[in-house]
Amino acid sequence: DGSVQDKTFEAKTNRTFAKREELRAAQDYDGADRLLQELLAQGVSMDQKKRLWWTGPRNFELRPWSRAEDDTGRKGSEADAALTTEISALLNKREEFRKVRDFGEADKIAADLTNRGIVHDDQLRIWWTGKRLGILIPWTRAENDT
């Protein structure tokens, strides 16, 4: 809701997820599970693959496609802005084909993107050119958290 209390809860929750990842990286799975249980007890739900969390019921609208923040490909030009718009539109079109189970057309779009050097991650809904630096996307609160 944007209140100070809500922002404090959001910051604390993000820190807890970050600490949980540190514990998992150190193979302290018991400690990581304890933190997860604390979050669940507070009514926090999560999607590990998408690195999103929310409280309460959630409207499962997909977040828009975006370019990976750690993409090392060329960025910043007008041509690049046009490429960003074009790639997002193609990925949305591919998604529509997949929804109606037209996997042949969806695969054609994926092949076209691959041939152009565009890599995409359906789970995270990001795409990139060139190489990624391998930076983990930080945990964020779902935009449509109610």
Image (tube, rainbow, N blue to C red):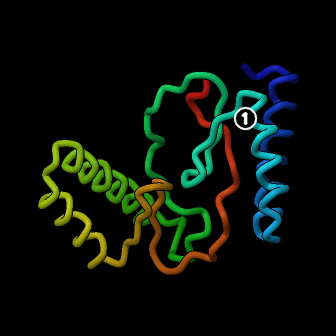
Image x and y of residue 138, in percent: 70, 55
129 up-or-down from 67: above or below: below
Q: Seen in the image, is 28 located left or right of residue 140?
A: right
* Residue 115: percent from left, percent from top: 26, 79
Residue at x 55% of width, y 51% of height: 50
User: Where is mark 1, residue-wise?
Assistant: 40
Which residue corresponds to the image point at 76% horizontal and 60% vertical from the top-left? 21
Please indicate whether residue 61 sits to the left or right of residue 48 in the image. Answer: left
Residue at 60% over, 36% down: 142
Residue nearest the viewer, comparing 15 with 73: 15
* Apparent side of residue 11 relative to residue 85 in the rendered image (left or right): right
- Amino acid type of the residue tagged 1 in the rendering: Leu
Find residue 14 and report its horizontal and vertical position in percent.
78, 45
Q: Residues within 10 Å of mark 1 (few under 14, many from 20)?
A: few
Q: Nearer the viewer, residue 79 or 90?
A: 90
Image coordinates for residue 64, horizontal then vertical, percent: 45, 44
Q: With 39 as the anchor, is 82 left or right in this view?
A: left
